[in-house]
């Protein structure tokens, strides 16, 4: 790996920053201490700092030269509602919360890049360092955009990065087009007519109706989605009834859907609603169906992905970059930023072998070894896109 000496020298300090953040995890829109820490660091580096977008978001602006081009670099800051089981010194000090997805490392890698770029200023244009709250579950990126992120801080392109456990340190993975799926959430309330379990003919049974709806929903993927496309419909909760001999009056179902193609996303919502309402009406019941488009598909644009691949390859060689990683059905709210601006979301390997585990696991920990590499990726990407000599 080709790491800048200055970032190697910063490794210990970045590790200390990461451990501090890890000890004090904060979940969606409550990242007050984390935001304070980030803002203080950015101000100490000489950046212009703006706070309050997306409630607890932080944006640092750094300009060098006379160019009018601008890029956005984004890191997420929030933790998970998860009890940490690690026993090391920097484990979570907050009961029931932990940095189980590596956002502490993402934040620190971007801070390291901000520090280096503020000192070197080896670029021509403007860099927006976007520290986003609430990536987990509630799409804080969408909230930042609604608050005017790109109107107040214009960029030509925007880039994100996430750690990838189970892969060898010193590698990256990315692909053009969809890299992560949408994540929508639905709820259906089926209302029938309750009654005695021994006399079903006198009731309109919402449990039987719900079962029929669930079965029909599964046919959407097998019979309405192109076999060369991918989609998931998962019913994750069913609530109905309170005792064994009473037919309830209503059943509540909820779950999630996933897709890579916005057209497939549209079709799934439409067909699920039609099926729920139609089957309920056929049995003399009613269905109320709600659908929340929480996360859009994360879709990398071609030119910006080429820039990301070139920046990563400069550090780890061409063999260290998987340019055609298989997309996953997980979701990421960086997708909302990519809906607004061209850009690329890349994966940086977090390590494999004994002691490594996947994200959202109570034994997970971000690998401090990759902090300089991640920071150097941001530096290399910035200097490539905002190249002084090309200005």
Image (tube, rainbow, N blue to C red):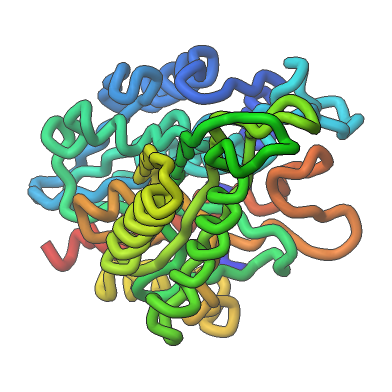
Work out which quarter of the rendered image holds the N terminus and state it. bottom right
Q: Quadrant of residue 147?
A: top left
Q: Nearer the viewer, residue 305 or 327?
A: 327
Q: Is residue 142 left or right of residue 135?
A: left
Expressed as whole percent of the image width and height from the top left, the position of residue 195 reads 63, 30
Q: Is residue 10 visible?
A: no
Work out which quarter of the rendered image holds the C terminus and state it. bottom left
Residue, x 77% and y 44% (percent of image)?
Answer: 361
Expressed as whole percent of the image width and height from the top left, the position of residue 138 reads 44, 33
Residue, x 30% and y 58% (percent of image)?
Answer: 270
Q: Nearer the viewer, residue 90 or 5?
A: 90
Q: Quadrant of residue 299?
A: bottom left
Expressed as whole percent of the image width and height from the top left, the position of residue 43 reads 37, 20
Q: Quadrant of residue 150?
A: top left
Q: Is residue 149 above or below residue 56?
A: below
- Number of numbered discs: 0
Expressed as whole percent of the image width and height from the top left, the position of residue 13 reads 64, 32
Residue, x 50% and y 25% (percent of image)?
Answer: 28
Q: Is residue 339 left or right of residue 43?
A: left
Q: Nearer the viewer, residue 84 or 355?
A: 84
Q: Is residue 63 visible?
A: yes
Q: Is residue 29 above or below residue 335?
A: above
Q: Is residue 225 left or right of residue 72?
A: right
Residue, x 27% and y 67% (percent of image)?
Answer: 263
Q: Is residue 131 left or right of residue 18?
A: left
């Amino acid at each position: 790996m080709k790491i800048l000496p200055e970032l190697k020298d910063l490794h210990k300090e970045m590790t200390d920053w990461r451990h501090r953040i890890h000890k004090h995890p904060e979940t969606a829109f409550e990242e007050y201490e984390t935001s304070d820490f980030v803002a203080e660091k950015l101000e100490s580096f000489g950046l212009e700092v703006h706070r309050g977008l997306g409630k607890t978001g932080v944006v640092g602006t750094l300009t060098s030269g006379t160019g009018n081009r601008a890029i956005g670099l984004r890191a997420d800051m929030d933790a998970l509602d998860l009890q940490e089981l690690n026993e090391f010194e920097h484990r979570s000090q907050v009961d029931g919360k932990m940095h189980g997805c590596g956002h502490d490392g993402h934040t620190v890698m971007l801070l390291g890049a901000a520090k280096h770029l503020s000192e070197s200023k080896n670029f021509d244009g403007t860099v927006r360092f976007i520290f986003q709250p609430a990536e987990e579950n509630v799409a804080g990126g969408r909230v930042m955009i609604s608050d005017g992120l790109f109107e107040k801080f214009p960029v030509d392109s925007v880039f994100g990065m996430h750690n990838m456990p189970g892969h060898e340190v010193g590698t990256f993975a990315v692909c053009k087009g969809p890299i992560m799926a949408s994540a929508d959430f639905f709820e259906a309330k089926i209302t029938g007519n309750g009654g005695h379990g021994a006399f079903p003919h006198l009731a309109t049974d919402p449990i039987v109706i719900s079962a029929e709806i669930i079965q029909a929903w599964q046919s959407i993927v097998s019979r309405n989605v192109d076999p060369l496309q991918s989609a998931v419909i998962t019913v994750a909760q069913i609530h109905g009834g309170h005792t064994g001999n009473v037919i309830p009056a209503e059943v509540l179902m909820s779950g999630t859907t996933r897709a890579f193609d916005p057209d497939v996303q549209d079709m799934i919502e439409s067909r699920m609603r039609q099926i729920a309402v139609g089957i309920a009406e056929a049995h003399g019941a009613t269905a109320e169906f709600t659908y929340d488009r929480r996360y859009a598909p994360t879709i990398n644009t071609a030119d910006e992905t080429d820039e990301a691949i070139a920046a990563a390859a400069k550090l780890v060689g061409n063999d260290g970059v998987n340019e055609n990683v298989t997309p996953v059905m997980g979701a990421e709210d960086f997708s909302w930023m990519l809906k607004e601006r061209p850009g690329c979301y890349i994966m940086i390997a977090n390590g494999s072998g004994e002691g490594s585990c996947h994200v959202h696991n109570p034994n997970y920990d971000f690998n401090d070894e990759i902090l300089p590499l991640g920071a150097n990726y941001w530096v290399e990407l910035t200097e490539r896109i905002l190249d002084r000599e090309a200005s």
